[in-house]
Image: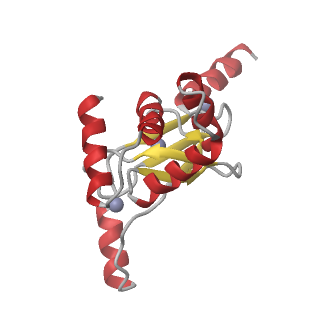
């Protein structure tokens, strides 16, 4: 965690920003809830638990800055809420998401898996790919098992 913060600090420095205590508090919440896909509001409430003096506007500005610097990615799962997701270190492109339409669970796929698709798009559309958002909507294995069990008891 500390070394991760050090590296984020360096990322900010190289873009001429400082890791102020307010920004650090926000980064810590994101690191502590790495799997959670928090909204700005969620981040704010968690920051407030430890640092009640930090306001919502400051948290918003920090999240925008971190998005700009590609420390976090902003993603919308179709509910109109922007969520903030830490970019995995060293990942050139954003990771993929699996969203269960039954229970709402969100899973992540860290492997890019799109190398072949990217090659085709770059060749046939002469489009230089910088990033992508890929969300699969479907039914998670847990919900599939539930339906299987119900079918058996019917
Ligand atoms: Zn994610
Ligand atoms: Zn990719
Ligand atoms: Zn599910």
* Residue pictured at 64% horizontal, 42% vertical: 56
Q: Nearer the viewer, residue 60 or 99?
A: 60
Regarding residue 20, the answer to whether it shows in the image is yes
Q: Quadrant of the N terminus?
A: top left
Is 27 placed left or right of 51 in the picture?
left
Q: Is residue 89 visible?
A: no
- Please indicate whether residue 101 sits to the left or right of residue 6 in the image: right
36 sits left or right of 102 in the view: left
Quarter of the picture for ligand 2?
bottom left
Above/below status of 95 relative to 141? below
Q: Kindly indicate the quadrant of the structure image that contains residue 42.
A: top right
* Residue 119 place in picture, x, y as percent: 29, 72
The image quadrant of residue 143 is top right
Tell me the residue at 69%/22% (across/down). Answer: 151
In percent of width and height, residue 25 lies at 46, 34
Who is closer to the viewer here, 129 or 99?
A: 129
Residue visible at 31% across and 82% down in the picture: 123
How many numbered discs, if any? 0
Percent position of residue 79, x then y: 71, 48
- In the image, 88 versus 126, the foreground residue is 88
| 126 relative to 153 in the view: left or right | left
Above or below — where is 47 with respect to 146?
below
Q: Is residue 150 above or below residue 68?
A: above
Residue lying at the far right of the rendered structure: 154
Q: Residue furthest top?
A: 153
Residue 77 x %, y %:
62, 49
Frontmost residue, 132 versus 3: 3
Q: How is the image coloured?
A: secondary structure
Instruction: Please state, as top left, top right, bottom left or bottom right, where the C terminus lies in the image.
Output: top right
């Amino acid at each position: 965690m500390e070394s991760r913060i050090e590296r984020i600090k360096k990322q900010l420095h190289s873009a001429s920003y400082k890791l102020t205590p307010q920004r650090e508090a926000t980064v810590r919440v994101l690191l502590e809830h790495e799997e959670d896909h928090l909204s700005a509001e969620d981040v704010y409430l968690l920051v407030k638990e430890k640092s009640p003096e930090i306001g919502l506007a400051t948290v918003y500005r920090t999240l925008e800055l971190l998005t700009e610097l590609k420390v976090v990615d902003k993603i919308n799962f179709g509910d109109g809420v922007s969520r903030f997701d830490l970019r995995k270190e060293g990942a050139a492109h954003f990771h993929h998401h699996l969203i269960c339409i039954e229970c709402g669970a969100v899973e992540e796929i860290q492997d890019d898996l799109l190398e072949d698709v990217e090659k085709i798009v770059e060749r046939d559309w002469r489009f230089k790919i910088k990033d992508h958002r890929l969300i699969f909507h479907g039914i998670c294995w847990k919900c599939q098992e539930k339906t299987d069990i119900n079918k058996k008891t019917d």
